Amino acid sequence: MDFFREGCSSRIFEGEEAVVEVARSKKIRQPLNGLVQGPDAKGRFFLEAPESNKRLLFYGGVPGEQAVVRRGRKGRRGEQGDLLEVLQPASARRYPPCRHFGVCGGCTLQHLPEAYALHLKSEPHYEMLRRFAPEAELLPPVPSPRSFAYRTKVELTFMEQPDGTTSLGFHRRGRFDRGVDVGRCWLSPLPSSLLSGLRQWMKRWGLKGWNPRSHQGDLRYLIYRYSFFTQSDLLALVVNGHSELSGDCREHLAAVLRREGVSGALVISQTSVAGAVVPDETSPLYGPQLLTERLGELRFELGWQSFFQVNPPAYERLLETMSCWRLTSPGKRVLDLFCGVGSIGLSLYRTGDRLIGVELVEQAVRDAKENASRNGIEAEFEVRTAEDWDKFETDLLILDPPRSGCHPRLVERLAKEAPAAELLYVSCNPHRLTEELPQLSARYRLVRAQAFDFFPQTHHCELLLQFVRREA
């Protein structure tokens, strides 16, 4: 079965374009035929390359298939490749609904049923935990309530292409300077007609997308937020601060967005050439500039840059589980490190608790204070790094670090002092967690763990762990 050619001529065209670029600078080697294994931590499948004793890594495979893979750039951990043909398709394989799959840098597992994909990406973490703590209870992974259109926040890029046209979509896989012009993103409720309207507006006013090499262009990013609770949305357009949108241009933009039913919109000016949103000035275009979202009985107000889990229905399942697991009785001390806008600590709050949240991002701390007040909860939130926090007198400790994990100083302190009788740890990078577990186990015993699928169609999953302090 030719995986790329079956029903999708545009995908093989885009793939061949990338191959031509490689062929100009490197000698093309013969494709490798072999048995598919994986996936690895990044959602890549692989074939064993006998002559190099390294893996030939690629996306879009299914374990146990016989496949032909094009050979490409060599790396420290293996060789990058592209799936050319599946000789013996696995019964689990399905046709991915998105026509950009395999080229866009977003989804990696759309070609697999959600239940099977969740098993593939969670089982390596469960196996690691079985080796680490065989006595711990490992509960079945929890699927997302939504398989598609679940992301309530999505960021698209306007990018100038080599032929002078502008793409509106995501980065091509593995490229910072090439974009994929997206007709529809299956992970977001963002309407495809809205993207069409923006392209027409852009063409009408002769606006160009950003060129990441020359650092020139008019338009940078499109940020779209949606609330499942109120079914309203907020759109932020990030423009080059050195380009000026006339009054008529802005009025036309507002008319296009209103026609598409967008609840509120704003324009962000940015002069920084950084490959991320670094706002200089923000100006409302029209409508409300905040969205309301709900988690259980709690309500949260979100601006265009507020940090919040992008899959609230799946996040609710994790919070409900944490609440059920909680062993600490009400009226105790609760310390929420990496608290963000306070969603976990506030959700686990019990009457009489003394809740303290710690977060490095100042805006998130302001949001957390407002969220606590809005929901009638007394809590303290401070702007500090978790590793520099020095008030560890607590009964329940909550950890929800970023993908880089906890700072070594923090892990060392927890292993040495074991300040809390109970520890609830939410890991968005279980591979990083593997490096921390040996130290934590010196004073904490893993009771149970469970994986949660916050990001269907991708290789990411969250891991919730409950620890209790070992008796001295």
Image: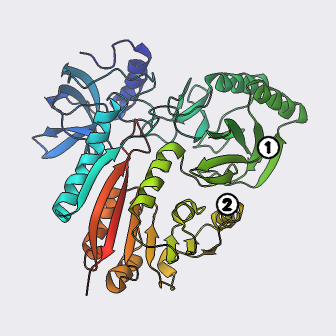
**Nearest the camera: 280 or 411?**
411
Using the rendered image of the protein, determine whether residue 272 is visible from the camera's viewpoint: yes
Q: Residue at x 39, y 39 (%)?
A: 458
| Residue situated furthest left in the rendering | 50
How far across and down, in percent of the image, does residue 472 sit?
25, 87
Q: Residue at x 77, y 43 (%)?
A: 267
Q: Which mark is residue 375?
A: 2
Using the rendered image of the protein, determine whether residue 311 is visible from the camera's viewpoint: no
Q: Quadrant of residue 219?
A: top right
Q: Which residue is mark 1?
A: 288
**Nearest the camera: 170 or 379?**
379
**Nearest the camera: 229 or 164?**
229
Q: On the rendered image, what quadrant is the N terminus found in?
A: top left
Q: Secondary structure at mark 2?
A: loop
Marks 1 and 2 sit apart, C-alpha to C-alpha, by: 21 Å
Mark 1, residues whose alpha carbon is within 10 Å: few (<14), some, or many (≥20)? some
Q: Secondary structure at mark 1?
A: loop
How far across and down, in percent of the image, does residue 414 sit?
37, 80
How far across and down, in percent of the image, does residue 44 sit?
29, 40
